[in-house]
Amino acid sequence: MIELLASPEAWAALVTLTALEIVLGIDNVIFLSVLVSRIPPQQARRARQIGLFLALVFRILLLSLLVWLIGLTEPVITVRGFALSWRDIILIGGGLFLIAKATHEIHGEVEAREGEEQATPGGGSAFFWVIVQIIIVDMVFSLDSIITAIGMAQDLEIMIAAVVIACIVMYVSSGPVARFVAEYPTTKMLALAFLVLIGVALVADGFHFHIPRGYIYFAMAFAAAVEMFNVLARRNRRKVVR
């Protein structure tokens, strides 16, 4: 451990891996923000805390099971020469879940039915369903995140430190992001579109067609910047009207 603290290579690996984990955690934060927007504020805060705590637990648990995790990349199904591992299957399933969930939410936003609130499960059942969905997506994102970490760093201590720092950043940023999504409803549609994009990327990864994450995150950043200008424009128009 002392050798790692004195090693410039270890610090460089920690900084690089932490930055990568934070970027990968953006998906988690967006999904959390969309999910908790449909439940009361107090429950939303608890759901965010539980969701990010579970994200940290899943990541550390997966890191402690490195041998088993590496085994997930071994082919388990082969059809006409095309092999799928458990990792591929989990990514495909998680991606399809994200696409289905985001599409369902988009449909609800577009329809804007008056009776929607009555149709939504109330109180504890809604909170429970949100937590279940958070657990499913946390598992998928954690798997992708940790396999990336294994490829970048060799020391378990560095990987755990990077994951803990990234989860702290996710926790700090999740509240403001969730409040922003709740305050400006149009940003929720943008966040849902991001989730569809992320789901497609996960499914593509599962089928061994890798879409460079840089392209995806650039598209997300560009769309977010445009939406920020829209928000500022609406805010200025309100001031003029007043």
Image (cartoon, grey):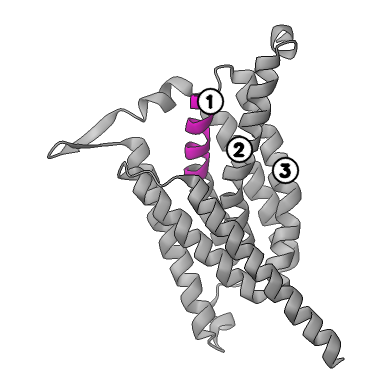
Q: Residues within 10 Å of mark 2 (few under 14, many from 20)?
A: many
Q: CA distance from mark 1 to mark 3?
A: 20 Å
Q: Of label 2 and label 3, which has the lower sequence position? A: 2
Element assignment for label 2: helix
Residue at 83% in and 92% down: 241
Residue 39 in view, yes or no: no
Element assignment for label 3: helix
Query: For residue 221, what is the image quadrant?
Result: bottom right
- What numbered label is drawn on residue 169? 3
Between 191 and 108, which is closer to the camera in this rendering? Answer: 191
Q: Of label 1 and label 3, which has the lower sequence position? A: 1
Q: Nearer the viewer, mark 1 or mark 3?
A: 1
Range of residues picked out in magenta: 140-152
Q: For this view, does 82 lie left or right of residue 95?
A: left
Residue 238: % across, % down: 80, 86
Q: Is residue 217 above or below residue 13?
A: below
Residue labelled with disc 2: 21
Q: Residues within 10 Å of mark 1 (few under 14, many from 20)?
A: some
Residue 5 in view, yes or no: yes
Residue 193: % across, % down: 50, 66
